Structure formats: C-alpha cells, structure tokens
Image (tube, rainbow, N blue to C red):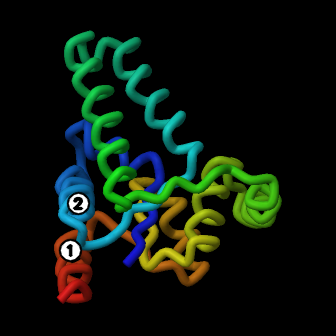
Amino acid sequence: MLIYLDSSIIVKRYIQEEGTSFADFLFDRASQGYFTLALNLLNVGEVLGVFDQYLRRNWVDQEAFNKMMAKFVDETLRLLRINQLVILPTLSSLQMDSWTFVLKHRLYIVDAIQISSSKRLKANYFCSGDKYITNIASELDLEVYKPENESAMIQRIESELS
C-alpha cells in the first residue's frame, strides 16, 4: 500500500494541530513496515519553510525548532533507509501534467504537483490537510483523507493491512 502525503499533513507530524494523530498513525505504521509513504521532493522544501516560519514568528523557540528539524530529518532518512518512503523528483513531465490542474482548478503549481505526483505513483490514498486540495483530489477519484472521517479512515487502512 502506498500513501501520498502533501506538505500540510507532513507538518502535522511535527507541529501539534488538527490531524496530528492521523499523521502519527501514518508515520508510525510506515516505520513498522505496514505500508510505504510517498511525497514529492518539493514537500521537503515546503516543510522546512513552514518550520522556519514558525521560528521567525516566534511560535516556537530555537530549541523547539531544532528538535522539529532533527526529528524530521531523522525520520525521513530512517524511512528511506528501510524502504518505507518514496520521494518523487519534480520532473519536467510531472510539472507539465500539473498544468491542467492549475488552469482547471485554480491551484498553485506546487499543490497541483502534489495531485499529479499521487496520480503518477498510483497511490492508494492522498493525504492533505488542505480542504480545497482534498476536495479537488476527491473529484479526480483519489481516495483522500478528511479530518472529519479520521477514525473511519484509520480503521479502513488497518483493515486493508490485515
């Protein structure tokens, strides 16, 4: 099973907010070898940018920032090492595939690339914390995470694993 994560759901793993328990579930189960997580290389830069924004706005102090960064890097490298994480490069063809979503759905290119990446990888699930992107992905027949259905989605994924 392959589960695609966009930047907003990745951030929830490291910053406590709505959706953190779901992000924890995904990362913990992937670490245990139950399924593979996927993301685009652009996500890494976006996540680092969000962490930096939290520091610059004084929402976290330097110590908390350093811990978030260390945990993110450590977890990413560990998942890569055990083959439970796929990082898709942002290829020209992937960007070109995304243009349709930009024009048709008024998405930013980075958000469109997330949907294109998920489709290209044939991910079983597309997980985002952004409701607009989730709605578009759902319209495109991707199985999506919605916070209001979090426990049902966890149960569904768990049942698919057994």
Viewer-side residue, 55 vs 24: 24
When the figure is inspected, residue 148 is found, relative to residue 24, above or below; the finding is: below
Q: Going 26% across and 88% down the picture, which residue do you hit?
A: 160
Q: In this view, does 51 lie to the left or right of 43?
A: left
Q: Residues within 10 Å of mark 1 (few under 14, many from 20)?
A: some
Horizontal and vertical percent for residue 56? 40, 12
Q: Which amino acid does label 2 sit on?
A: Phe
Quadrant for residue 17, please give it.
top left
Per the image, label 2 sits on a secondary structure element best described as helix
Q: In this view, does 32 lie to the left or right of 86?
A: left
Q: Which of marks 2 and 1 is nearer the N terminus?
A: 2
Secondary structure of the residue carrying numbered label 1: helix
Q: Is residue 13 above or below residue 62?
A: below
Q: How crowded is mark 2: few (under 14 residues within 10 Å), some or many (20 or more)?
A: many
Q: On screen, 160 above or below 75?
A: below
The N terminus lies in quadrant: bottom left
Q: Quadrant of the C terminus?
A: bottom left
**C-alpha distance separating marks 2 and 1:** 8 Å
Q: Which residue is identified by label 2?
A: 22
Q: Is residue 104 left or right of residue 60?
A: right
Percent x, y for residue 20? Answer: 22, 50
Q: Which mark is residue 50?
A: none
Q: Do the residues labelled 2 and 1 touch (CB within 8 Å)?
A: yes
Instruction: Name the residue beneath numbered marker 1.
Output: 154
Which residue sits at x=55%, y=83%?
A: 141
Residue occupying image coordinates x 68% and y 54%: 107
Q: Where is residue 39 in the image (x, y as percent from the top left)?
A: 49, 55
Q: Residue at x 48, y 65 (%)?
A: 134
Residue type for callout 1? Ile
- Describe residue 157's horizontal placement relative to residue 87 as left or right: left
On the image, the x and y values in percent for residue 138 come to: 51, 76
